[in-house]
Amino acid sequence: MKPKVGFFSFTSCEGCQLVVLSMADKLLDLLGAVEVVNFREASSYKGEDYDVAIVEGALSTVHEIEEIRAIRKQAKILIAIGACAHIGGINCIRNFDNQFEIKKAVYGERAANFDSILAQPIDAVVKVDYYSRGCPPNRDGEEFVEIVTAILQGKKPYIPNFPVCVQCKMKGNVCTFHKEKPITCLGPVTRAGCNAHCPSYGNACIGCRGLVEEPNLNAHQETLSGAGLTVEESLNFYRMLNGMMEVGK
Amino acid sequence: MKTLYTPEMAVIKKVIPQTPLETFFELELTERKTLGHKPGQFVEVSIFGLGEAPISVSSAPEPDKPTFELCVRKVGNVTNALLEKKVGDKIGIRGPFGNGFDIAKFKGKDILFIAGGIGLVPLRSLILAVLNRRPDYGRINVLYGCKTPRDLLFKGELKSWECGGSVECLITVDLGDESWQGDVGVITTLIPRVEIDEKKTQAVIVGPPVMYRFVIRELKSRRLPDANIWMSLERKMKCGVGKCGHCQMNDIYVCQDGPVFNYAELKKIPESI
Amino acid sequence: MKQFIIKKPKLFELIDKLARETTVIAPVKQENFTSFAPITSAAEIVWGAPQTVIPPKQFLYPQSEDLLAYEFGNGEARITGLNAVKERVLFGVHPCDLNAIGQMDRIWAEKNPDANYLEKRKAITLVGVDCLAPCSSDAICLRLNGLDPKGRFDLFLTDIGSAFYAEAATKKGEALVEGLRAPAKAADGKRLTAVQKKRTALFDKQEKKLLPKYKDLSKLMKANIDHPVWEERGKLCYGCGSCNMVCPTCYCFDVQDYMHVSLVKGVRSRVWDGCMTEEFAKVASGENFREDRSHRLRHRTYRKLNYLYDKWGESFCTGCGRCVKACLTKIVSPLEIANEIYSRKI
């Protein structure tokens, strides 16, 4: 029997769902393997009949925390998809500012009516079984399909634990630090699996897949300062998507 | 095109669960009469769609026997899937690989087998080969240690290895239970109970990396020369044919030049133990 | 070895023709570097510096290559065939990479011949081009015995001004330039010697010095397994594997199965792996046999300068300098490590 899959969305741009929908040929294969019973905007999560919950977005309100707990209760398998769900992502930038000021800036007079809290990844609240990393998850869908296939096979999916540099070099890219106009890059500490998508298009890696298990942050600090970044600029670079790592993730 | 990496098919003939983690398999190759292995060699077991895992052969080499045996612990994707397999299922096999034990070197000697946990699996191949020609050897002792009585491998067989008293088997567990009457303690506690003749005794050790240092220290305190100590080492053996590089310790490819080493040689390999 | 003279326009015409008829792979511009890629005409070729980001090993030993394909039917796996190998010309390979390919030829053929490599190798016509100036300040080829190609090519071209001086080490190399070559005369040989002499002097002036003697490298390494250099440099290692990926003589691989989501078919592929990465020596049970970054740096360096040096009688660093460039924390240069060990006796 095909596993029943529900998609759920928390604080995010909902781009991860779009990526899944745009996996073209792979999407058809996927739809052959699973049955989708709930896709995003379907707002009700209670009593839905699903075994696998695919969750995008970070948790940033009290209400979202209640929702994710309910989803976890129902789902046999929970997949966090995208950087927001996996590491809090861009939402966590605001965690480093005064929450009261931020709320006031966004909601003005009615700030008190909103139950927003510090942004956090899904696994800060419930257990996550699988992570489909990245912002957005890798576009050719390879890794997402690997995870779904792994679930169907009953195996642990293959997710690399080496830096982006490995795949960046395999592609034969000119290192961002060695370009005519060098760009600072988080590739040396970020987990590969994206086939170095951003550096392959001339951009820096911004760490959207989270860090490797043993990142050499001292070495990276040396590299970044050698490239002219101040400590604060370096920190901000990390905080763009990896702010959560500072609170022990 | 058949290459170094093309597995042969083998049929599962027997499946016997051993412990909650380990299962015993008897296998038969479909296109060859016999595996033709030496004790201490390993095969790459292949589950299509998941990958390969290096597994020690645990049966004695018997030229006329079409089947061979493996005892597999669940530790990863391949071994987890293997443990789901049933009699009649087919899996892929490459090998045998590695040097294996040179059994001729033990002729006329006393042999002290020391196994820790799953280390008994490769050692069983050698023990059975030796027992098949019992009169060729002197005193034989088997020391076997594992975590708890639940983890004991080849439980039913251990008694038969004693050959009615001509082999002594001592077993210890790190942690006993209500029903356990035997020894409790680490494996090194058994060594003082064994007679060691520094000229004649050959010690063969297989176990987890941490065990080697302590066992060797104990054997050295009994003045056993380095050259009389043999070991089989574990490494990440991905290709089995000395190419992929994962099993290397210094300049040695464990999958080709090992996994069996003499301690006197091993001492010259700083990355070994 | 046979020597010829080939007029430049003739050679360019040949390349154009070959590019039309078969696959010719040569260095082409890639931003401020170059890369080996299929070309359509000789005009695309970058003949000297800058160097390619990754070596040409990718055409003999691809980044990812299927070892097996299989299908499931009636609950059983059936191994299906793989694609046939295509004939290709690998053009404009520099001496450091020619040496590396020569070394890889030995490695893959040794003991258990690896058909996946050897079949591709057989289908390659290898055309080298001599370097007349160092390709970058990172190059250390002269110091590590990598500038002399030692006959490891089918055809080798040196620009002697008006023409190319060509050496053919194989029948394949001779056949390639059949009809457009003239036998080399004594005067041509003299020109070649003069060009090479000038070139070698230039490399000697510009390349970083190797303090220990080349022939002592292996002994020096072996004697310094506990030198503080490993710990000091290892501390700054990312474990990013860049040095492995760009190295023409790194050949370690990982093997992964990729199952189709329908679960009816799959492939088993080998993918470049690097001994500098965290999990290279980690087994399924969790034990990591080379956990320490400094030990991994030592292992990589030893493979180049000690283990394979002793086994095959030459350094397996051919001095291309790619790792020196690629390493962002500047820890990995085999030459610098050797120099540091040599000058800081313990």
Image (cartoon, rainbow, N blue to C red):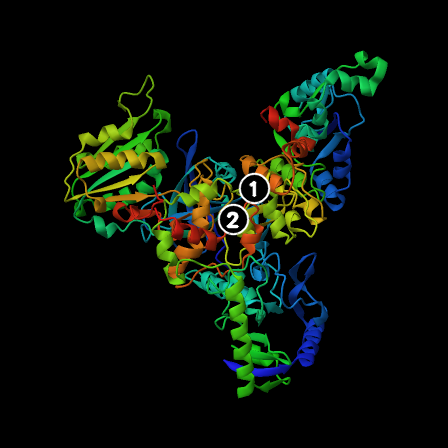
What amino acid does circle 1 point to?
Answer: Phe
Residue at image mark 2: C274
Identify which residue is drawn at 64% across, 45% down: C260
Foreground residue, C222 or B14?
A: C222
Q: Which mark is residue A162?
A: 1
Query: Same chain, marks 1 and 2?
Result: no
List x then y, in percent, for residue A100. 75, 15
Q: Pointers 1 and 2 in contact (CB under 8 A)?
A: yes
Dot 1 falls on which chain? Answer: A
Identify which residue is drawn at 63% across, 37% down: A147
Instruction: Locate residue A7: give its quadrant.
Output: top right
Q: Is residue A215 visible?
A: no
List x then y, in percent, for residue C5. 60, 83
Q: Is residue A119 visible?
A: yes
Q: Is residue B114 left or right of residue C288?
A: left
Foreground residue, B191 or C297?
A: C297
Q: CA distance from mark 1 to mark 2?
A: 10 Å
List x then y, in percent, for residue B55. 42, 43
What amino acid does circle 2 point to?
Answer: Gly
Asked if residue A61 is positioned above or below residue C132 in the image, the reply reads above
List x then y, in percent, for residue C332. 50, 49
Q: Which mark is residue C278?
A: none
Q: Quick one: label 2, few (<14), some, or many (20+) residues within 10 Å?
A: many
**Number of numbered callouts drawn:** 2
